[in-house]
Image (cartoon, rainbow, N blue to C red):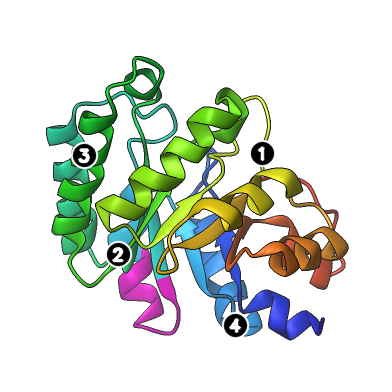
Amino acid sequence: MDINEILKHVDHTLLLQPSTWEEIRQICDDAVKYQTASVCIPPSFVKQASEYLQGKTAVCTVIGFPNGYMTTKVKEFETKDALANGADEIDMVINIGWLKDKKYDLVEEEIRILKAACGEKILKVIIETCLLTQEEKIRMCQIVTRAGADYIKTSTGFSTAGATFDDVKLFAEHVGEKVKIKAAGGISSLDDAEKFLSLGADRLGTSRIVKLVKKEEATGY
């Protein structure tokens, strides 16, 4: 697969806690130069990045990140605030404890509420696959589909592991036809990126792919 085609699927990501505006601005510049799908950045930088980019690339941010156990009202406020500040895409973290407790209705309702807040803007649902059983992953494919979200996403990149080929393949077998797949966390090579896409991923959450293209050391998310 052509490198430019891979880059079109990349959410160029910087979510580390000590991130500065200078670093965020650099990934914004890289995203424009290499024509990535978006930049994925902390909510506190959304307004500044949106004004800086002026629509040259989509601005994605994270909600309930990275643990997901905030109340639904807090996540809804975060979402509306991020959209008001210029976010184009929202990546939310589910309440994993609710899923473990089999409170499936609460998990689904929360996704519905955030999708209603997003309207036509894209909502991606992070389920943190490394903490889930196979049964829970399949259940989340069903819930995300019913709730009307746009994407199911593997990982935050802040837990015990990131995306795996097996999880993306599992998603592709169980999500509805309107739900796309985002693989995120630990995507460290162009070969891996290409394989994730071939297995059904539509987006790749990573900071390393652009670094590889720039011939830099591929460290980070």
Q: Which numbered disc, 1 or 4, marks the residue that appears first in the sequence?
A: 4
CA gap, disc 1 and disc 3: 23 Å
Q: Nearer the viewer, mark 2 or mark 3?
A: 3
Give the secondary structure at mark 1: loop
List the residue tagged with mark 3. 110
List the residue tagged with mark 4. 35
Q: Name the kind of residue labelled 2 in the image.
A: Ala
The magenta region covers 49-58
- For the point 66% across and 44% down, the residue is 167
Label 4 packing within 10 angstroms: few (<14), some (14-19), many (20+): some
Where residue 58 sits in the image (x, y, percent)? Answer: 41, 74
**Is 102 in front, or is 162?**
102
Q: Is residue 186 visible?
A: no
**Is 145 in front, or is 52?**
145
Q: Which mark is residue 162?
A: 1
Give the secondary structure at mark 4: loop
List the residue tagged with mark 2. 87
Q: Which numbered disc, 4 or 2, marks the residue that appears first in the sequence?
A: 4
Q: Is residue 95 left or right of residue 34?
A: left
Q: Which numbered disc, 1 or 2, marks the residue that appears first in the sequence?
A: 2
- For the point 41% across and 18% down, the residue is 100
Label 3 packing within 10 angstroms: few (<14), some (14-19), many (20+): many
Q: Is residue 126 left or right of residue 54?
A: right
CA gap, disc 1 and disc 4: 24 Å
